[in-house]
Image (cartoon, helix red, strand yellow):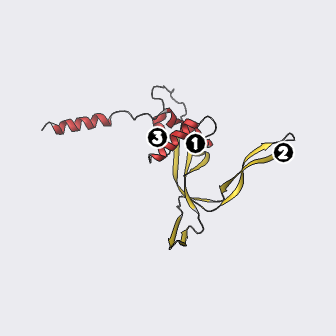
Amino acid sequence: MRIVPLLILSSLLVSSLPVKASSDADCSIWLCLPMGFPSGCSEAKSAFKHRIKKLKPPLPNFLSCLATDVQVPAGTPVSTMDAKHGVAAIMSYSKQCTKYEYDNQGQQHCVEYGLLPDRIIKNTPCIIRRVHGEIVQWTPRNCISTTNWVDTYMDGNKYGETFYYR
């Protein structure tokens, strides 16, 4: 039968193709996420949200973002990038300052408040068990909800702040 050799040949050709490069917007997530998507990172934030909605990992494979036609001289140190992500239990929220400004005398003043988590337990979901609408058990005790998180690493060291999202 000719179908079997054709299937083997086509699988060999497909497996030898280079890794599909991620889009510029996807790759810019590596730059913007560790800083919390500051101004100028709207495309990266949109790409991040799109990846999450499509149930993809929050960041693309870093190797798919590297230029393949650049020649790096021998002996040049090359950094490695990595990311870890998971779920976390939020223990409570409180009103905290989210934006500061300085007055003419150099004194710092809070100009914007928001509800921020008091404590987050990584790699632990908040599980609330209800019976007839009443909470009978929650794990960890007194958690209020579950969130997601991403940490980025450069050369094995944490790079930027943990980014939390829902």
- Sort mark 1 into few (<14), some (14-19) or many (20+) by Cα contacts within 10 Å: many
Q: Position of residue 4 (x, y in %)?
A: 17, 39
Compared with residue 66, is residue 157 higher up or lower down, i.e. above or below?
A: below
Any part of residue 79 in sight:
no
Residue type (three-letter) at the residue carrying disc 1: Leu
Q: Who is closer to the viewer here, 6 or 52? A: 52
Q: Position of residue 87 (x, y in %)?
A: 52, 56
CA separation, marks 3 and 1?
Answer: 14 Å
Q: Which mark is residue 23?
A: none
Snapshot quadrant of residue 18: top left
Residue that badge 3 annotates: 61
Mark 3 lies on a secondary structure that is loop
Residue type (three-letter) at the residue carrying disc 2: Gln
CA separation, marks 1 and 2?
Answer: 30 Å
Q: Earlier in the sequence, mark 3 or mark 1?
A: 1
Horizontal relation, residue 54 to residue 91: left or right: left
Q: Which mark is residue 107?
A: 2
Mark 2 lies on a secondary structure that is loop
Snapshot quadrant of residue 41: top right
Residue type (three-letter) at the residue carrying disc 3: Asn
